[in-house]
Image (cartoon, grey):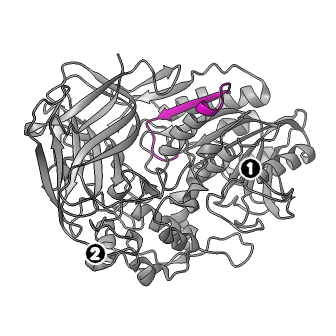
Amino acid sequence: MLSGRNQRSKFASINGEIVMKKLLIIILFFASSLQFAQGVEWIKENYLKKDYRIQMRDGVTLFTSVYSPKDTTNNYPILMVRTPYTVAPYGEDKFPQNLGPNDTFAKDGFIFVFQDVRGQFLSEGKYDNMRAYIPNKKSSKDFDETTDTYDSIDWLVKNLRHNNGNVGIWGISYPGFYAAMSLIDSHPALKAVSPQAPIADWFIGDDMHHHGALTLSMSFNFFKGFDQQRDSLTTQWKPAPQYDSPDMYNFFLKLGPLPNANKKYLENKLPFWNAMLKHGTYDEFWKSRNNLPHFKNVKPAVLIVGGWYDSEDLYGPLNIYRSIEEKNSKNETHLVMGPWYHGGWSRNDGSSFGDFTFGQSTSDYYNNKILLPFFNYYLKETGQFNLSEAVTFRTGSNVWVNYNEWPPKDAEKKSLFLTTNKKLSWNKPIEKKNLFDEFLSDPDKPVPYVGKFHDSGLHYYRTYMSDDQRFASSRPDVLVFETELLENDVTVSGPILADLFVSTTGTDADWVVKVIDVYPDSTKNPNPNPNNIEMGGYQQLIRYEIMRGKFRDSFEKPQPFIPNQVTEVKINLNDVDHTFLKGHKIMVQIQSSFFPFIDRNPQKFVDIYNAKEEDFRKAFHRVYFSKQYPSNISFGVMK
């Protein structure tokens, strides 16, 4: 990914735009980092490439590239990726740097299949973002991603020479979504699937929204390129709009209300962006794209992979895992969560993230000890695969932990209550007086989501999910509560729930809760220290989440706040597995903006997608803590 400090503020050419897309998107999904690459010449020497057009049940053909081992003395399983991000390089004489999730796969021997999904690049048909599953198909020609996968597998096992009849599917992010969809009404030959950072729901928790709040910088920068419509079958990305751009914070602040995106830059040319702005509530447009209700009768073995620092799709892997577990009394599903950003397990050795090192190569452990054995066992029937139900990397203490279930049932539920003097207490408040802290929230001066300025062309600053939060705690529009120094280690495992009692002088508000690990003042700086990190008092972000206040009771039917009336707002934060070490503190920060990763709330009850400049207004927000209004965060603590 391009560095926000080094990237030019203007992408001056189409080629530059294509390079940017590949760095920000494509490389994630084909795992073609130098770390794992075999090299073009090695692949040419050992694999034969053939291109096919596989016909679907409705007559549409999907472009599919197949790389088969030249050694035909054995039969091999098929390992497939279905992607909207191109199967380039195109042409039977063109080869990529890498074939599998890591270089060991090609050396072990698989038949590698890459397919442009329906409507993308050289595949026929019309593309639909997160195409909805059709549970009750009315004809033999009805299609969705499950049928396209089924039809493709059926053709592959019947027509590819030297295949052993077993098929596996994997993919990261959007290809992870397609991998997950293959589990529904799966083909009998599909034996193993690894959805990695898969998408589940684009309104509740993945990519484009968090609890109904738009991820502005990511959505804008993703769709300005991805949502460009092709004129015909193509092997090229269509260029995105070109414009001068300052840093991200100021670019999106100057953008103003969301309708200005089309007026200034997008020119109403992006159909999904436009559709998204017409569906500001959790209506059928979004519900139909939610795949969580459909993971029934899952038959293949499943390895779900996610990253604790994945800003795009952390919700997806955790909740797809839960959905499969809830709907299938018998299944072979495992969950792996590591200290990775989006796709990081396939792009670097995972020995560090942001300002922190882990003392080991977490990606190497996962790739060599988990991923390859998984596919070898279920597709080749070789080796052993004795993985626990869930394997997570516990941050803070920096160790891999095996669980028989996730979240762990033996975790003891505890709560930290907001109290006076900006403290957090393990004891429920007994004060009858309705105490509160308040702050003024100004949409013209929103709280930045990260304390660094970076180019507005990036989706987000990659390491913000573990960054130092002292830049925020010093602002008057951020409330700060913390424990005393911990007398013992506190390990939090599983989901976190924030239960706030709030009021506002406006009729809408966003509520952002951040859980933070505060390091002792005596913590030594790293040596060497090229980034001049000050570790004494470092406030490491562990987890955050936002709730767009009008959706506090229903995502389908938003309701305004009654000004100055105390209202309960519950916010589900994604799971963690983190140890707050002895001598550290647990901190909670509460704020009402997280800009520009999240768009601004006008603080007036309106359709934010169509808000006007005059709708944005200042408001005072209060958070209460008393016996009657015990604002708190709760979580599971390992005994």
| Residue 558 appears left or right of 186 | left
* Secondary structure at numbered mark 1: helix
Looking at the image, which residue is at 31% across and 32% down?
634
Along the polypeptide, which appears first: circle 1 or circle 2? Answer: 1
Q: Which mark is residue 146?
A: 1
| Residue 363 appears left or right of 436 | right
Q: Which sits in the foreground, 370 or 629?
A: 629
* Dot 2 crowding, Cα within 10 Å, few <14, some 14–19, many 20+: some
Q: Residue furthest top?
A: 639
Give how far across and how far down residue 426 sits, in percent.
20, 26
Instruction: Classify 23 as above or below 306.
Output: below
Q: Which sits in the foreground, 303 or 214?
A: 214
| Residue 598 appears left or right of 138 | left
- Quarter of the image with the C terminus is top left
Q: Which mark is residue 102?
A: none
* Secondary structure at numbered mark 2: helix
Residue located beneath label 2 in the image: 615
Looking at the image, which residue is at 29% across and 50% down?
512
Q: As shown in the figure, which amino acid type bears the numbered disc 2?
A: Asp
Give how far across and how far down residue 342 sits, in percent.
49, 47
Magenta range is 325-343
Q: Quadrant of residue 435?
A: top left
Looking at the image, which residue is at 28% across and 44% down?
514
- Quick check: is 332 in the magenta stretch? yes
Q: As shown in the figure, which amino acid type bears the numbered disc 1?
A: Thr
Q: Nearer the viewer, mark 1 or mark 2?
A: 2
